[in-house]
């Protein structure tokens, strides 16, 4: 009986952690999209629409390489000067921001 409760507790925590990670990744993708949109001179509705395309792109595969490739390709197409390192650093910083926003509710 106690083992069942403990197992259910672990399963519940794991599910909660997975949900939080999914939310954080989606939030980060949106924030990265808004950052990239600003770099490309987009604002308002255009920036919001672009950010949505980034969120969708981030769902293509596990990990963050799909997100990075989208931003890299879009910056290259628009001749936006950002190194791979700068993009990856921004992604890391915005992941921390996304986690804080989710924790804050």
Image (cartoon, grey):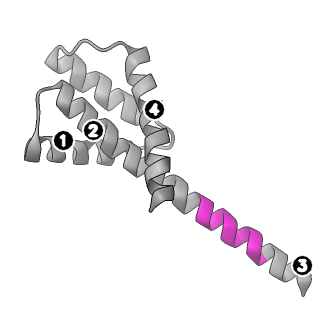
Task: Name the foreground residue: 67 vs 34.
Answer: 34
Task: Name the foreground residue: 66 vs 84.
Answer: 84
Query: How dense is the environment of label 2, judged by Cα within 10 Å: few (below 14), some, or many (20 and up)?
Result: many
Residue range of the region highlighted in magenta in the rendering:
8-17
| Residue 37 image position (x, y, % from top left) | 19, 33
- Real-space Cα separation, disc 4 to disc 3, in angstroms: 40 Å
Instruction: Identify the residue shown where x is 24% and y is 43%.
Output: 51
Sequence order check: which comes first, mark 2 or mark 1? 2
Residue of label 1: 50
Q: Nearer the viewer, mark 2 or mark 4?
A: 4
Task: Name the foreground residue: 68 vs 87.
Answer: 87
- Real-space Cα separation, disc 1 to disc 3, in angstroms: 48 Å
Residue of label 2: 33
Sequence order check: which comes first, mark 3 or mark 2? 3
Q: Main secondary structure of the magenta part?
A: helix
Q: Answer with left or right where residue 60 lies relative to residue 43.
A: right
How many marks can you see? 4
- Real-space Cα separation, disc 2 to disc 1, in angstroms: 6 Å
Sequence order check: which comes first, mark 1 or mark 4? 1
In the rendered structure, are the residues bearing label 2 and label 1 in contact, judged by CB atoms less than 8 Å apart?
yes
Instruction: Identify the residue shown where x is 27% and y is 38%.
Output: 33
Residue of label 4: 93
In the image, residue 9 lies in the stretch drawn in magenta: yes
Q: Callout 2: helix, strand or loop?
A: helix
Q: Is residue 45 visible?
A: yes
Sequence order check: which comes first, mark 4 or mark 3? 3
């Amino acid at each position: 009986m106690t083992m069942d409760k403990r197992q259910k507790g672990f399963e519940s925590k794991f599910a909660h952690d997975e949900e939080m990670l999914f939310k954080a990744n989606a939030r980060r993708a949106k924030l990265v999209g808004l950052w990239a949109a600003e770099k490309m001179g987009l604002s308002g509705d255009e920036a919001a629409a672009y950010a949505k395309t980034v969120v969708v792109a981030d769902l293509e595969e596990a990990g963050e390489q799909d997100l990075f490739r989208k931003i890299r390709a879009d910056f290259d197409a628009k001749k936006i000067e950002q190194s791979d390192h700068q993009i990856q650093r921004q992604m890391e910083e915005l992941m921390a921001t996304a986690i804080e926003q989710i924790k804050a509710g």
